[in-house]
Amino acid sequence: MSEDKKMLVDGEWCAAASENTMDVCNPATGEIIATVPRASTEDADRAVAASKVALASKEWALMDPAQRGRILNKMAAATYAASKDLAKLESQNNGKTFREALGEIRYGAWTLEYFAGWADKVEGQTIPVPGNRFNYTLRQPLGVTAHIIPWNFPLQLAIRSFAPALASGCTVIAKPASLTPLSLLEWARVIEDCGLPSGVFQVITGPGGEIGDALAGSSGVDGIVLTGGVSTGKAVMKKAAENLTPVTLELGGKGCNVVFPDANLKFCAKAVCFGIFMNAGQMCWAGSRLIVHEEVAEELTTMIVEEVAKWKVGPGLSEGVRIGSMVSKAHRQSVLDLLEKGLNEGGELVCGGGCPDGELENGAFMEATIVKGVGMDDTLFKEELFGPVLAISTFNEDKEALAMANNTEFGLLNGIWTQNLSRAHKFARDINSGMISINEYPITFPQTAFTGWKSSGIGVEQSAEAMKFYTRVKNVNVNLG
């Protein structure tokens, strides 16, 4: 039976003003597991007004920063304590495996701990200026921040942006993806007693085209954070421009693993599978391109096929499953359509390419798919499928590999596999992307910058750099007379 959920607006759990609702499904079975409020612009306006009141009260913004840090640490502890229940709910709502969901939610708790440590380290500067003057800067909270959350990592990517915003003294309005709101709503209940003042943190559910637009275009919002597709990012940026509202956009990717003959192929094969088949390939930083030297291409391809054969496909809560359901049948179909287009362009199917039948046919499952012989102008090389599809291309010389790695509109995460440190560092310097990983893939930490170049985004998530977005500089000049 499905549950009726409420959203958190202005300190209370409530329905939408219209009392309209949306169904939420389990993509592994297709069954409705909950309903959530279908908010409108009226609800969004109410959330913004409440957030402004909470900001203006200064209870959070001027709280002892060390105390803000303690509250974030309480939130981290509560997240750890509830992580298994949250992971089960996320697996049911998103389709991913319990194992993946649990790791991601615990990563979210780690992120809260990291930024808890930053709360009392937001510092200004004193500046030497001419004359009998004292000049200094303050870093103050940016203000009301709106966070538009994606469906592929519904809770972890939400916490990734909440943590620095709250540590900085900002107020937060969260808009989860319509497909996957449940783990975030439950997390909001989990942290209710951790000490956040009323209105500092809110969760509003509803269609992205309406609620996301309302938040992005609101004059009451001081900063917007989005993780999503390029087209959505452009639409949000356009709305934000109406009020000159700053944005952080983490968008798409078409990451590659560049593999040289001296690489540790056994370890590489496992990492390549992890980088494209985890979360059923629904990741912005997925290593969807394998650019491998022709000397070892056949050997590495065989090792990858053997490795992924061990990855069982099935419901995320089932024992031994490594690839869960995709988020919806509609999304799966879009991946299958692009795959078909790519195969018609000349790519050779090595394995997969279809959907499991039998007991899995009612869910949005897709087989792990590998295609070799992919050219630089092919769909599978250039377009982000956002699914479990690995495109393999070969090279002969280093300069050719570099040109292939950079032949994309995206620039998020790319991997380099070699024992030659000179080559590794040169490629790390010359590949046009915000993140490079050498001899492992994919990898990130709360203290390291998560950032994209080109069409992969604007701004930085995670790390000390993220704190800069959520604070603004004020210069104070004092004439000492």
Image: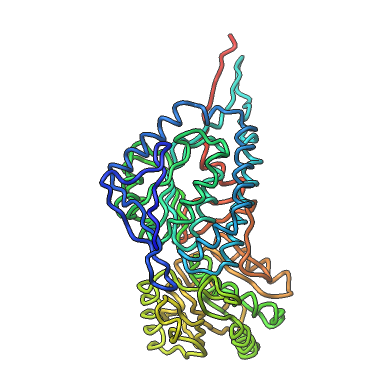
**Relative image position of residue 87 (x, y in whole percent):** 55, 61
Res 403 seen here: no
- In front: 281, or 289? 281
Q: Is residue 309 above or below residue 58?
A: below
Question: Quadrant where the C terminus lies?
Answer: top right
Residue closest to the far left: 18
Q: Quick check: 375 left or right of 402?
A: left
On screen, 278 above or below 355?
above
Question: In what quadrant of the picture does the N terminus appear?
Answer: bottom left
x, y percentage for residue 285?
53, 66
Query: Residue 106, image x and y in percent?
Result: 62, 56
> Where does the image place residue 59, in percent across and percent down from the top left?
51, 27
Q: Residue at x 60, y 73 (%)?
A: 274
Total labels: the figure holds: 0
- Residue 397 falls left or right of residue 155: right
In percent of the image, x 32 and y 44: which residue is there? 217
Residue 305 seen in this snapshot: yes
Name the residue at 34% across, 52% down. 206
Pick the front one: 308 or 36: 36
User: In the current view of this chain or complex, which residue is farthest to the top?
Assistant: 481
Please report the residue visible at 40 percent of the width from the left and 57 percent of the height from the top: 3
Locate residue 397: give its quadrant: bottom right
Frontmost residue, 235 versus 115: 115
Image height of 79 relative to 59, above or below: below
